[in-house]
Image (tube, rainbow, N blue to C red):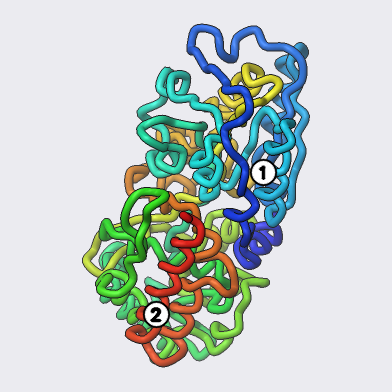
Amino acid sequence: MTSVDRRAFLVGGVAGGAALALAGCSGTLPKVVAEPASFGKNATGTVQVWCRSATQAGLTSAVAGFNKANPELQVQLTPVPDAQYVTKLATAIRGGEPPDVVDIDDINSQLFIFREAFADLTDVVEDLDYFDAISPGHLRLLEYHDRYYGLPYLADNSQLFVNTELFERAGLDVEESTKDLSTLLDAAKAIRKLDDDVYGWSISGNAAGIIGFVTQPHVWATGVDMMTGEVGSQRANITGNEALERMLEFYRQLWKDGVLSKATYSDAGTTWGADFRAGKVGIFPTSYGATVPAATKAMRAKMQTVLIPSWDGQRSFFDGGDNMCIPNGAANPSGGWAFMQYANGLQQQQALPDGGYFPTRSDAATPEYRKRFPLAYGPLDAIEKGYAPRTLAYNLLNNQPSSPYFAMFREAVFGSGSAAAMRTAQSDYQRILDQVQA
């Protein structure tokens, strides 16, 4: 996927009416029965696979390789624009003609699982010889009532990228200077003093999807979320959330101290990462795909990554990316599982950074992989620290320009401060959760 595709996805938000689009999308289609002894074995025919346009590049080579190796079982890949994906899939399921495999934004998995639209794949997933190496954060988004309804495929993780040359010029040690919010603030201020056109930190302050992607892990690292409770009965957890308040105050201080450029306020993410790749930013929370592929070889040599810290020194990262699921009523579910296993094979997983993504298997980080992708194994070494919220309302809460998380961040950082912003967000979060869970 190109950086433009990634920016369009994260900046524009997706599926604002996702929950409403799924009204009536229930478990009325024939259930898929997945038994390890036979499922995915000796399948023939065609496998219809839908993928997100934004992550199509992550699948193209896997499909080509599978089709070459399996002349009796051919995959037909259909990309669907991200903003239309949930609605089109819900329509196909309601119409009784779903694809065999859906490669879906992991954060949207629960929308369909909660409504019994995806096949229970627990037995075949747990039977995989690499099950213990699978990203627990992605698996969690596929879990409902202790059953698994899909298999993780690719990861899109947020991390802190640092410019080691600027750190050295400022006399800073990367690990010591990035261990919590206090040391990060001090480091960012020190880097800002190096030159008038050098900034300590960069963020797209007017891009809802990017803001959620890179700032929430500061909170999640402490073990708390902006919601509590199980899917279907979740409650807002904004007011009184110390980790959230400290994160907002941290960004407000970056802004007040001039560590962020004045362009931050209106930056909608259209040139996300260009300032860091140009060597003008010391610390940049971002994704691998938005930072590394477009950077020069010289700039990549100056980059180092660390996981995103909380105020109290714990670390996390956003477990974004795609999960693969099989809808109930699929015409060729066994063939679909055969392809899913192939796509999750070690060789295919280890090639994902070529398209801007990470594997979802920690055992992919072999010595050869580390040598080939020196900036793409941090989350694999700490795979248990990844997180993304399991909810029916993520896009409405975070990705839309009108979302309460985005409005809260903007008001807390650029406006009147965190107290009033958090009070407003508490009620707006709860209103949205009540609507989608009704």
Residue placed at 60% from the left, 43% from the top? 104
Labels 2 and 1 touching (C-beta < 8 A): no
Mark 2 to mark 1 CA distance (whole Å): 38 Å
Observer-side mark, 2 or 1, equals 1
Relative depth, front residue between 41 and 179? 41
Q: Position of residue 159 (x, y in %)?
A: 44, 59
Dot 2 crowding, Cα within 10 Å, few <14, some 14–19, many 20+ = many
Task: Work out whether mark 2 precedes mark 1 in sequence or the reverse, and give the earlier one.
Answer: 1
| Any part of residue 367 in sight | no
Residue placed at 44% from the left, 31% from the top? 148
Q: Describe the element under mark 2 as helix, strand or loop.
A: helix
Residue placed at 45% from the left, 85% from the top? 411
Relative depth, front residue between 165 and 432? 432
Q: Quadrant of residue 153?
A: top right
Which residue corresponds to mark 2?
251
Q: Is residue 223 left or right of residue 339?
A: left
Relative depth, front residue between 438 and 172? 438
Instruction: Report the residue that reaches farthest toward the left.
Output: 312
Q: Quadrant of residue 222?
A: bottom left
| Any part of residue 338 in sight | yes
Which residue corresponds to mark 1?
90
Q: Is residue 258 above or below residue 16?
A: below
Q: Position of residue 255 (x, y in %)?
A: 43, 87
Amino acid type at image mark 2? Tyr
Residue placed at 44% from the left, 78% from the top? 408
Amino acid type at image mark 1? Ala
Q: Position of residue 269 (x, y in %)?
A: 62, 72
Dot 1 crowding, Cα within 10 Å, few <14, some 14–19, many 20+ = many
- Residue 282, disc: none
